[in-house]
Amino acid sequence: MPNVRDRWAIANWKMNLLPSQTAGYFERLRACLQETQVSVAVCPPYPHLPAATAAAAGSRIRIGAQNLSDQPQGAFTGEVSAAMLQDVGVSLVLVGHSERRRWFGEDDALVAAKMRVALEHGLCPVVCVGEGLEERKAGRTQPWLQHQLQPLWEVAQAFPQLPWLIAYEPVWAIGTGEAATPAIAQETIAFIRQQAEQHVGAPAATLPILYGGSVDPDNASALALQPELDGFLVGGASLNPEAFAAIVEALTVVKA
Ligand code: PGA
């Protein structure tokens, strides 16, 4: 059966590049992106967002944020709301990235609350899950992921018509240069999809599930061939627009 799910390539700049470098990045990215069916998104830091939405205007590149508040508005110093993101032309948002979970204490309940707020405001949440090295080595990957995914299903059930994405990002592969093998990515994403089928039923068949963790132009093709993998969330390699475009290109592969 042909794969009916959309393919995605999402750039996560993390806390890199300056607002003044944004326009130049997009100029280069637009110059080397082929006409492609792949859905491409770039997630710069907050201060870059207006420049990014302006630079992406007239292209198919979507702009995403890296985080959002779980609160709608009010006295929450330093926070940024879903409505603010929407107002500057952002259409998707990363939620629960492992760096948010690790360094900023985001737990599974907060991640689910952020996913809900995003959906309520018409933003497409890209919810990140993934096990650490300890869980992987101890053979506890599946229960770990089940635990992270559990609160998300309830939110997904409440918004059955709205798009969202899952990014499987094993913590041991992020920023280490050691991507998961294609076999591990395939097997783990298949497990996540099977969980999705159990909890949300038919929509699981069209839920894009991406892989993230040290994706680069050299390893992207072998990973992209995996039938369950619907795209990439790319950190370090996405800072170079030519490298990111090569990763987008790898996703145009025809799968068996
Ligand atoms: P990396 O980051 O590509 O630099 O490993 C991926 C991510 O954290 O989203």
Image (cartoon, rainbow, N blue to C red):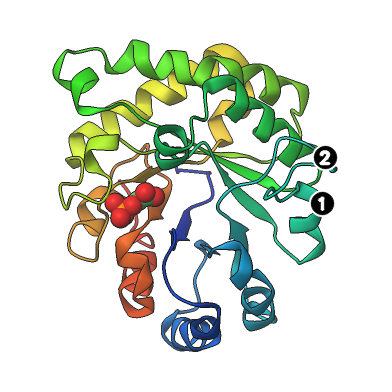
Q: Which residue is mark 2?
A: 72
Task: Name the residue rendered at 37%, 67% in the picture.
Answer: 238
How much space separates mark 2 and mark 1, taking CA atoms?
Answer: 7 Å
Q: Which mark, residue 223?
A: none
- Quarter placement of the N terminus: top left
One can see residue 192 in this view: yes
Tell me where residue 127 appears, x and y as whole percent: 53, 37
Residue situated in front as seen by the camera: 209 or 63: 63
Q: Secondary structure at mark 1?
A: helix
Q: Are marks 2 and 1 in contact (CB under 8 Å)?
A: yes
Tell me where residue 139 appears, x and y as whole percent: 19, 13
Residue 138 lies, with reference to residue 213, above or below; the image says: above
Residue situated in front as seen by the camera: 24 or 1: 24
Task: Name the residue rendered at 67%, 50% in the picture.
Answer: 78
Residue 223 lies, with reference to residue 10, above or below; the image says: above
Tell me where residue 45 appears, x and y as whole percent: 55, 63
Q: Is residue 20 left or right of residue 221?
A: right
Mark 1, residues whose alpha carbon is within 10 Å: few (<14), some, or many (≥20)? some
Specify the amino acid type for callout 2: Pro
Q: Which residue is mark 1?
A: 83
Q: Is residue 25 left or right of residue 240?
A: right
Specify the amino acid type for callout 1: Ala
Residue situated in front as seen by the camera: 110 or 39: 110
Q: Secondary structure at mark 2?
A: loop
The mark nearer the N terminus, 2 or 1, is 2
Q: Is residue 114 left or right of residue 235?
A: right
One can see residue 201 in this view: no
Q: How many marks?
A: 2
The quarter of the displayed image where residue 20 is located:
bottom right
Whether the residue carrying mark 2 lies under 8 Å from ligand 1 is answered with no
Residue 38 lies, with reference to residue 28, above or below; the image says: above
